[in-house]
Image: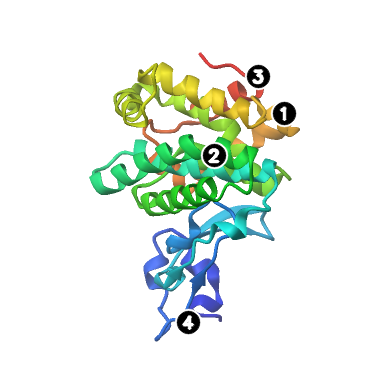
Amino acid sequence: MATGLNDPWRAEVDDAMAAVPTPTPPPPLIAVPTTAGSGAEVRSTAVITDPETRQRRVLRHPALMPAVAILDPVLTIDLPPNLTAATGMNALTHNLEAFCAPGFDPAAEGIAAEGVRLVRANLGNAYRNGHDLMARSMMLAAAALGGIAFRRGLGAVQALTDPIAALTNAHHGLATAVLTPYVLVHNRPAVEGRIDRLAAYVGLEKGGFEGFLHCLLSLRQELGIPHTLRGLGLDEARVRPLVAAALADPFAATNPVPLTEEGVSGIYMNALEGKLP
C-alpha cells in the first residue's frame, strides 16, 4: 500500500490527515504563479479534482508549502482578459470569504481586507491593459494575501463552486465570480457589520453592505462576467444534484451562516435566476 505523499488522498482534509508522514527532508518546492488567483503559492493546501469521482478534494500537508514564492508580473502580462477577470475575481473571493469567516484571527482578517482593497483598485486596470505592470504586480500581491488569509477559512462560495468546477467545464474562478453576490446576500445577517467596516476600509463613497454589494456587481459587469449561472451554461437539472456535494465540501464548515440543504439550494436557484433579494 502506498504511503506518505505517494498516496496523495491520505492528505485530504479530514480526521485521518494527521497520520500522513512528512518526508525528511521534504523536497524543495519553488512556486512561480502565472496567474493572480488562487494564492496557492503561499499555502500548504491544494485543491485537486479526483479523476475517478470528479470531486474536488482538499489536501493539506507541510511538504506542500513552497520554500520560495516568486511573484513576477511579467509572467502574467499575456494572460487573456477573460482569464485575468476570472482569476482576479477568485483572488477577491478568497480574501472576502476569509474576511467574513467566523473565528478569531485578526491578523488574517486584516490581510484579507487589504487583499480586497488591492483587487478593487487594480483588477480593472489589469483587465483593460494586460501590460500594466503595476496593476499586475498588485494583483499578484492580492492573490498571495488571499492565500495567506485562507487559513481563516472560506465559505459557501468555495463550497458551491467546487462541485460546479469538478462536474462541468465551467472555469472555477468564473463560477466563483458569479456566485459571490448571492452568497454574500445569503450571509448578510451574520456579516453585515463586517462588510460595513470593509466598505469603509476599501474607501467606497457609498458605504455599508448595499454600497459594497453595488461595488461588487459593478466590478463584475465591468469585467464582462455573467450575472447568472445560466450564463455559464447551467440549468436547474444540472445544479440540483450538486447540493449534496456542496454541503459535504470542507469549506462549507466555515461559512458564517451554517449551511443547510435548503440554504444551498436557494443560493443555487437565485444564482440561476439572477435573484438578489
Q: Tag 1: Cα neighbours inside 10 Å, few (<14), some, or many (≥20)? A: some
Give the foreground label among 4 and 2.
Answer: 2
Q: Residue 231 carries which label?
A: 1
**Relative horizontal placement of residue 86, taking residue 105 as reference (left or right):** right
Q: Which mark is residue 273?
A: 3
User: Disc 1 or 2, which lies upstream in sequence?
Assistant: 2
User: Disc 4 or 1, which lies upstream in sequence?
Assistant: 4
Residue at image location 67% in from the left, 28% down from the top: 226
**Rounded to the nearest whole Å, what is the CA distance between mark 1 and mark 3?**
10 Å
Give the foreground label among 3 and 2.
Answer: 2
Residue at image location 30% in from the left, 48% down from the top: 108
Give, as a three-letter code, the residue at label 3.
Glu
Q: Is residue 48 visible?
A: no
Give, as a three-letter code, the residue at label 1.
Gly
Q: Tag 2: Cα neighbours inside 10 Å, few (<14), some, or many (≥20)? A: many
Q: In which quarter of the image is residue 221?
A: top right
User: Disc 1 or 3, which lies upstream in sequence?
Assistant: 1
Give, as a three-letter code, the residue at label 4.
Pro
Coordinates of residue 169 in the picture (x, y in percent): 73, 45
**Relative horizontal placement of residue 186, taking residue 56 as reference (left or right):** left
User: Disc 4 or 2, which lies upstream in sequence?
Assistant: 4
Q: Tag 4: Cα neighbours inside 10 Å, few (<14), some, or many (≥20)? A: few
User: Disc 4 or 3, which lies upstream in sequence?
Assistant: 4
Give, as a three-letter code, the residue at label 2.
Leu
**Relative horizontal placement of residue 66, taking residue 57 as reference (left or right):** left
**Rounded to the nearest whole Å, what is the CA distance between mark 4 and mark 3?**
48 Å
Q: Residue 27 carries which label?
A: 4
Give the foreground label among 1 and 3.
Answer: 1
From what the image shows, is residue 196 above or below residue 92?
Answer: above
**Rounded to the nearest whole Å, what is the CA distance between mark 1 and mark 2?**
21 Å
Give the foreground label among 1 and 2.
Answer: 2
Q: Mark 2 points at which residue?
A: 123
